Image: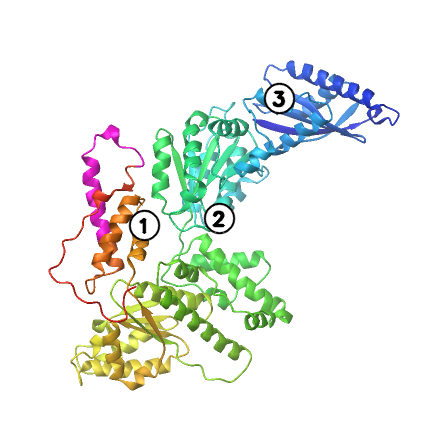
Amino acid sequence: MLYYQFTGKLKNNDTENSQMTRQERRSMAAGICERSQKYSDGFKDGSYWFVSNISGDEVICGAIGSEKLDINACAQQFFSAIGLDAEHDSSDQISFRKLLDMLETAERQDYVGCSSDVLSRYGIKDIDCGDLRRMMLRDGVIDDGVETEKLYDAARRELAAGTLTPELDRIFAGTAAEKHYGHPVHYIIEADSESSAANITGVLLSALYKKERILSRCYYEIDSTNGRMSEDGIKSVYEAATGGAFVISLIDEWSESGDELESFGKDVFDALCREIKAYSNRILFIFRLPKECTAIKKRIAEYMGGLSFVELKEDNVGIEEAKSWLEAKAKQRGVDADEMLFTQLDEAKTYNVSELGRIYERWYNTKLKTVIFPQYSQISECGIKQEKEKQMGDAYNELASMIGLAEAKAVIDKALNFYKLQRMYKDRGIDQARPAMHMVFTGNPGTAKTTVARLFARIMKENELLSRGHLVEVGRGDLVGRFVGWTAKTVEAKFREADGGVLFIDEAYSLVDDRDGSFGDEAINTIVQQMENRRDSMVVIFAGYPDKMEAFLDKNPGLRSRIAFHVPFSDYSAGELCDIAKHLGRARGLKLSDGAIEKLGGVFEAARLSPDFGNGRYVRNLLEKTEMNMAGRLLSIEPDAITAESLTLIMPEDIEVPAAKPEMHEKRIGFGA
């Protein structure tokens, strides 16, 4: 539906006569109500016209129609028909929520008999502002004055030109239709952040309204629910949105990846989707989804398999285009981009607009306090000193959300606080030699040592403790040369490659295992030298088994003295392994049944008795076998008996219990829950 507000200026305001009694006022309002109804009945298009309020010399009116109404042409006619000597002043389309407010005011002032009767004429039953709040439904108004070229510019600015520009070309192709026939396509927008998806939505809706592909300037958004929306309530909301656009957003930056549907409300999402086909030609539907959302797309396809969707996504750009975007963003704010902004970029990476936006905001907030308003440059440092500084950034949040690793997380927290204190000394001009930042990661295979090292590199970059924040992973074969004199040069080359980031040396003890006096010694000596030379610009992390790592450090006291932190990675408990399995399942669009989780717990308890069982790798391998078993089970079922839920639900019988080994070994001291 389309909703309007229009106003008029009263020339001779008898309605505000202070001598008028309450009864006379009610009689006057009843007359206006009756004449408004008669005027509305004269329209074959079913439109409804009413007075909402009269205050001073202003009369505020509303109109509802299923098609566009020529308010400018009809307003003066309406004033005359209801007996008001008024001159049309202004008019505009309004949101449904605003219309409800106007109808409630009109009912209180007796200009409308019953507001719910008015809504019932249009199939909008039993819905009010309270219902909208409970549904967490918002409405907005499309910007209709944007020039076509500026919409293309906005697509490029949002780094969505790869998919959005071709769609703008399709929208603007040909002439506008004489009437509204329906919607040939609907849309799925995938983005890292809600703000980026909202900007793409704005460009899309402006273009569609400009070409009259949608009638109403009002659009509706729902991004979370209270878990209770009846089908009648959904139908009423869709009736209210007829002629406009309806956005269903599942981008939830606060929920864990894969949990967006649960956070939104799966039952409500299904109920919304069930009704979409019936309204697909009267409402334009836009789904805003997180990236890599295969399970949600499958769910949409189940309900709307006959509808066509255009998918719009953020572009991934290289470093030069990323720099141009950051420069333009800074110019827009009236500040100059500097090298500190660009050093946050990695030449080997690509970036989308959400990632660049976060990089820019971190840089701008720092620049605001240190350059634009230098008088506040010390405030943040005082705040850091007075209360424990929180490590901010995506990588830190990602590390914090990882399952288990309590000891490792605690040591890394201490390390970050320590490094930041050293930076504070340097910023304050306190002369203090910077200690080495190098580390040892000890733990069994599959305990996420490499993953944490990669996140640690990014955390150091996000906290401006390293300039690049990349990870270079090496083993013995990458460091030890084949001939005399080659090893030192090979090691130096790897250190140059890792400068500004982290050099991760896996199974470092393999450099010297049973090889005293060999090329491995040359590698260790060069490593020690490079660690000292680059102590201010990079971190070296040695990783491996705890006992072997201790023996390795004992062979070279100079190496041990340069290690600042020892980070232990314990084996995962059976409960943590179950959580990892659930997380990996969600990433594949699968869910574990309660029975499957219980069975996995027993499998993991048994597996943990074997040395080097693989931890996270074991879970991944087991889940891959489970998925194959699940496929075999589903193919044995009659197709008609397979539901959407059964396609993604892992059952206990899908899990294969590994054959018991003839011998069970004691676990090494220091591992296990």
Q: Which mark is residue 582?
A: 1
SS of the residue under disc 2: helix
Residue 561 screen position, x and y as percent = 34, 84
Q: Which of 668 and 3 lies nearest the eye of the viewer?
A: 668
In three-dimensional space, the C-alpha distance between marks 2 and 3, rounded to whole angstroms, equals 38 Å
Depth check: 32 or 176 in front? 32
* Residue carrying label 2: 196
Instruction: Give the mark, 2 or 1, whose residue is nearer the N terminus.
Output: 2
Q: Are marks 1 and 3 in contact (CB under 8 Å)?
A: no
User: Which residue occupies the foreground of this view, 162 or 39?
Assistant: 39
Q: Residue at x 35, y 61 (%)?
A: 404
Location of the N terminus (image quadrant): top right
Tag 2: residue type? Answer: Ser
Residue 494 in view of the camera? yes
> Residue 118, labelled with which disc?
3
Q: Position of residue 283 (x, y in %)?
A: 49, 29
- When asked about the image quadrant of residue 383, the answer is bottom right
Q: Is residue 196 magenta?
A: no
137, above or below 603, in the image: above
Disc with the residue nearer the chain's start (1 vs 3): 3
Q: Residues within 10 Å of mark 3 (few under 14, many from 20)?
A: some
